[in-house]
Amino acid sequence: MNLTHNNLKGIKREEGQKQLLERNLESHRSRKWIINFICAISLLVSVLCFCFHVPQSVIIPVILLFICTIIKIVHKTLDKKIELRLKRVKQEQRKNIFKVNKP
């Protein structure tokens, strides 16, 4: 009785953790527009630098491109990290379900 009760408690806790990770992943992916907006603004700044012949017009776009690339890489890395954690939680949940179902 106590073993089954503990298993059910663990399953409920893991289900809550799974839902939390799913919400985190969804909110993380919904923030992608911010990254696209930053890249669009930096492209606009780069074009304006070339149009107005800013003295450092080569350095500024390179730096902005570098920043945008790093932001995109970090965003994708965090996305993959959350996905892997979610997969791990789902696998643990399946293992626990099989443990409970075994006689």
Image (spheres, grey):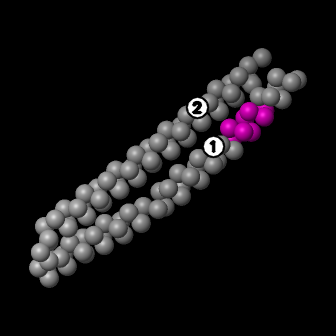
Q: Quadrant of the N terminus?
A: top right
Q: Of helix, strand and loop, which one carries label 1?
A: helix
Q: Residue at x 31, y 53 (%)?
A: 70
On screen, residue 64 versus residue 50, left or right, reads: right
> Which residue reaches farthest front?
55
Tell me where residue 103 appears, x and y as whole percent: 78, 17
Amino acid carrying mark 2 in the image: Gln
User: What residue is drawn where x is 74% and y is 33%?
Assistant: 10
Q: Quadrant of residue 97?
A: top right
For residue 88, which numbered disc appears in the image? Answer: none
- Give percent across and percent down for residue 61: 20, 66
Tell me: 9 left or right of 53.
right
Answer few, some or many: residues within 10 Å of disc 1's Cα (few below 14, many 20 plus, some between 14 and 19): some
Which of these two is toward me, 52 or 31? 52
| Dot 1 amino acid type | Lys
Structural distance between the alpha carbons of marks 2 and 1: 11 Å
Q: Within the magenta stretch, is there residue 44?
A: no
First to last magenta residue range: 8-15
In the rendered structure, which disc, 2 or 1, sits on the residue that comes first in sequence? 1
Mark 2 near mark 1, Cβ–Cβ under 8 Å? no
Q: Position of residue 51 (x, y in %)?
A: 14, 81
Who's the residue at 38% across and 63% down the image? 35
Q: Which residue is mark 2?
A: 91
Residue 10: in magenta span: yes
Q: Main secondary structure of the magenta part?
A: helix
Pointer 1: what residue? Answer: 18
Question: Which one is in front, 71 or 32?
Answer: 71
Q: Is residue 50 placed above or below 83 in the rendered structure? A: below
Give the residue at the far right of this rendering. 1
